[in-house]
């Protein structure tokens, strides 16, 4: 990866983090090993589709992992 590509990736991740809901999600996940979508939803005054939208952005930015367990999805910070 070139320096220019690394810079672009860093800027993309920073733009993801610039949204207050996503920052709070990451704070909650860092305080807990993992949380279900239901657990996260209780912390916000947003709808489930809105939370899913934010989670998908965090996953696409490779900041969060999602692991399906039956009907639940567990989220955790991607440490790699």
Image (tube, rainbow, N blue to C red):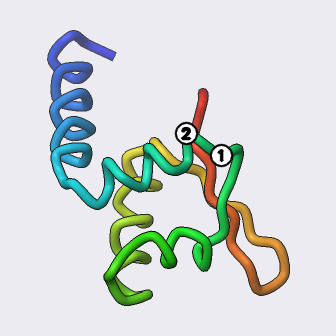
Query: What residue is at 21 percent from the left and 10 percent from the top?
Result: 3
Q: Quadrant of residue 14?
A: top left
Nearer the observer, 40 or 49: 40
Do the residues under discs 2 and 1 have CB atoms within 8 angstroms? yes
Along the horizontal axis of the image, is 19 left or right of 69? left
Q: Is residue 11 above or below residue 15?
A: above
- Relative image position of residue 39 (x, y in whole percent): 61, 72
Q: Which residue is mark 1?
A: 32
| Residues packed near mark 1 inside 10 Å, few (<14), some (14 to 19) or many (20 plus) | few
Residue 10 found in image quarter: top left
Judged left or right of residue 42, residue 66 is right
Quick check: 20 above or below 8?
A: below
Question: Image quarter for residue 60?
Answer: bottom left
Q: Quarter of the image for the N terminus: give it.
A: top left
Q: Residue at x 35, y 60 (%)?
A: 57
The reply, left or right, for residue 38 in relation to residue 26 is: right
> What crowding class fits label 2: few (fewer than 14 Cα within 10 Å), some (14-19), or many (20 or more)?
few
Q: Position of residue 28 (x, y in %)?
A: 50, 50
Left or right for 47, reference 13: right
Q: Quadrant of the C terminus?
A: top right
Element at label 2: helix
Circle number at residue 15: none
Q: Secondary structure at mark 1?
A: loop
Above or below, 62 against 71 in this view is above
Q: Return the x and y of residue 32 as percentages of the image width and height.
A: 65, 46
Query: Separation of disc 2 and disc 1 at Cα?
Result: 5 Å
- Residue found at the far top of this picture: 3
Between residues 22 and 11, which one lies in front from this camera angle?
22
Give the x, y percent position of residue 23. 31, 48
For the point 53% across and 69% down, the residue is: 40
Q: Residue at x 52, y 48 (%)?
A: 64
Q: Which residue is mark 2?
A: 30
């Amino acid at each position: 990866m070139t320096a220019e590509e690394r810079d672009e990736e860093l800027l993309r991740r920073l733009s993801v983090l610039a949204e207050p809901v996503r920052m709070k999600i990451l704070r909650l996940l860092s305080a807990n090993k993992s949380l279900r979508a239901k657990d996260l939803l209780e912390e916000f005054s947003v709808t489930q589709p809105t939370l899913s939208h934010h989670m998908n952005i965090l996953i696409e930015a490779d900041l969060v992992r999602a692991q399906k367990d039956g009907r639940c999805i567990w989220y955790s910070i991607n440490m790699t």
